[in-house]
Amino acid sequence: MLDQIFGQNQFLNEIVWKRTGARSDAKRWNQLHDTLLVYTGGGEYAWNPQFEEYSEDYIATKYRFTNPDGRIYRLDNMTSPNPRPNMMYEWKGFPSPAKGWRYSRETMAELDAQGRIWYPDDKTKRPQLKRYLDEMHGIPMGSVWTDIDPINSQALERLGYPTQKPLALLERIVRASSNENDIVLDAFCGCGTALVAAQNLKRQWIGIDVSPTACRVMAKRLKKDCGLKEDEKLWEIGRGFIVRDLPKTEAELRKYPAFEFENWAVVALGGIPNKVQVGDLGIDGRIYPVSAIPELRVKEHVEMDFMDVWYPIQVKQTDKVGRPDIDAFETAMQRAKRKLGYFVGFDFTGDALFEIDRFHRQTGCEIKPLTVREILDEEIAKYPKGEKICP
């Protein structure tokens, strides 16, 4: 597909990123890497070489000399690799190499004045160039990247998005293939890591995703991680961002796939959708108050952990939520020992609202019924006791 879009001649590199360690797989070679395919748009293209740090062994082996001022250096050959008659001259009593010097007299004089030439005591040996460690960029990056760890369950940047990539990986890609103020386009941007990388590196950016849930996750991330505001006027002067074409009507939301509709509703409430859609025990998402311990938000399995503080969310895409739906949610709340829950639907029957009231009076547990219209209009009921909900 990329050959068709860009042309076969625009293929530049295949890069292997090692994203995980060895694991057991008896039937095939362990799949430990992802592949990056690098294409250019043709003609001139941005290219900024990237470097990795020298290893301690490399430094100990190559950089074995120290100046009186403490600067560490290695010695490099100053003879020409190819015959250069115009570079054949005597330098400070040292005869010309057979193929000439690597540098002209003028350059040799500049290097000498800067103290960058090492002179041996024996005139039969060659002067050499001092290359200082503190001036070296490092080892040029190759096509195999092993120095960037994947996102794990303890990573601070983890959002729970299934295909989330490390920010360091996207920053390397953006830094290598664009310059400041260039435009970075991510047409399948998921949770927005490429956009954050572009913003951090002073690039302009455009992100596209088919999922409204992903778009709202991105918006929250740009606000939190980059300090940007979602504001039309600030966007016009390059200091904010906007989100376009999210659903604005109930009719649009009725056409959504069920799981995507659930995700939209949960995220719109400031909650976290369940990663696993099957076996959710009647709970589609969770809202955490600011008093909740942060570590508990990123745990893989917290369905049966009753020590944390969270409120369950249930979502139905039916025209009207009925009493059986409320009965099932009550059971889920009691199973999870929750005193407060949120139920989202397009509308509620009289029986459903009556049961919500009865449940509250008899058990003290409260279900907040919220319509899609209320969410779209941002007319969500206030949370009990004034407690702030953390998105």
Image: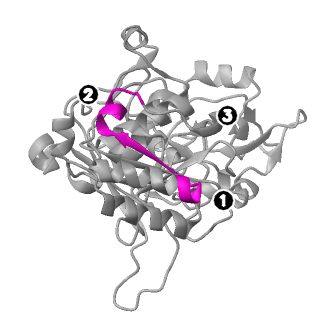
Circle 1: is it few (<14), some (14-19), or many (20+) Cα within 10 Å? some
Queried whether the magenta region covers residue 128, the answer comes back as no
Task: Report x, y in % for residue 181.
Answer: 40, 19
Which residue carries the number 1 mark? 308
Q: Residue at x 23, y 49 (%)?
A: 320
For the residue marked with disc 1, what is the amino acid?
Asp
Q: Residue furthest bottom?
A: 26
Magenta region: 361-379
Circles 2 and 1, Cβ within 8 Å, touching? The answer is: no
Q: Say which residue label 3 marks.
A: 135
Of marks 2 and 1, the one in the foreground: 1
Residue type, label 2 = Glu
Q: Percent x, y for residue 310?
A: 59, 53
Q: Nearer the viewer, mark 1 or mark 3?
A: 1
Q: CA distance from mark 2 to mark 1?
A: 55 Å
Residue 43 coordinates in the image, percent (x, y): 20, 29
